[in-house]
Amino acid sequence: MAKNILLINGPNLNLLGTREPEKYGSTTLQDVETAAIKQAAVAGAELSTFQSNYEGAIIDRIHNAKKEGIQAIVINPGAYTHTSVAIRDALAGVAIPFVEVHITNIHQREAFRHFSYLSDIAKAVLCGFGVEGYQMAVGYTLANM
């Protein structure tokens, strides 16, 4: 049975490649997703992707992941990292192991970005590695699921 991974990206990550390139680089979300799908395929796994600017849509996708047999989640919750108890509760509720990833080092940014509602229940947290953090998160997930 192939390993099934879900990559979730939260609000504004659809703007990767054009949004504040000095912070986020020029790589697009499509580039990130394509690379993650290929990385998983090489390892014999399946990876699906989802992006939404809406908290409820992300929660619904997490709930559906359980029904679909998703075995691990890689999530960049964007700004919801710092505000969403609901996404935390969804992840805890489905009990699917997940890795939290951030492109920038959230601890070098504004004080309100230093806290994550997800980190203490995540299997791992990556921040500050740029879009390479996604590759590291998928690699970790493949090796540890």
Image: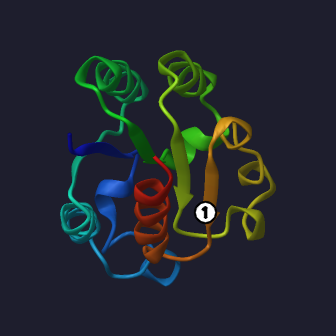
Quarter-of-image position of residue 120: top right
Instruction: Please give left or right for residue 106 compared with residue 65 in the image.
Output: right
Does the rendering let one see residue 50? no
Give above or below for 6 relative to 103. Answer: above
Q: Nearer the viewer, residue 145 or 80?
A: 145
Secondary structure, mark 1, is strand
Residue drawn 40% across and 60% down?
Answer: 138
Q: Nearer the viewer, residue 56 or 135?
A: 135
Residue drawn 39% across and 52% down?
Answer: 12
Give above or below for 56 relative to 53. Answer: above
Q: Nearer the viewer, residue 121 or 53?
A: 121
Furthest toward the front, the residue is: 1
* Residue wearing tag 1: 126
Image position, residue 10 (x, y; %): 41, 44
Residue drawn 47% across and 30% down?
Answer: 96
Q: Report the label total.
A: 1
Does the rendering let one see residue 143? yes
Image position, residue 40 (x, y; %): 26, 61
Image position, residue 73 (x, y; %): 42, 42
* Quadrant including the N terminus: top left
Q: Residues within 10 Å of mark 1 (few under 14, many from 20)?
A: many
Residue drawn 26% across and 68% down?
Answer: 39
Furthest toward the right, the residue is: 111
User: Looking at numbered disc 1 in the image, what kind of residue is underneath it?
Assistant: Leu
Give above or below for 119 relative to 12. Answer: above
Quarter-of-image position of residue 88: top right
Image position, residue 57 (x, y; %): 32, 25
Image color mode: rainbow
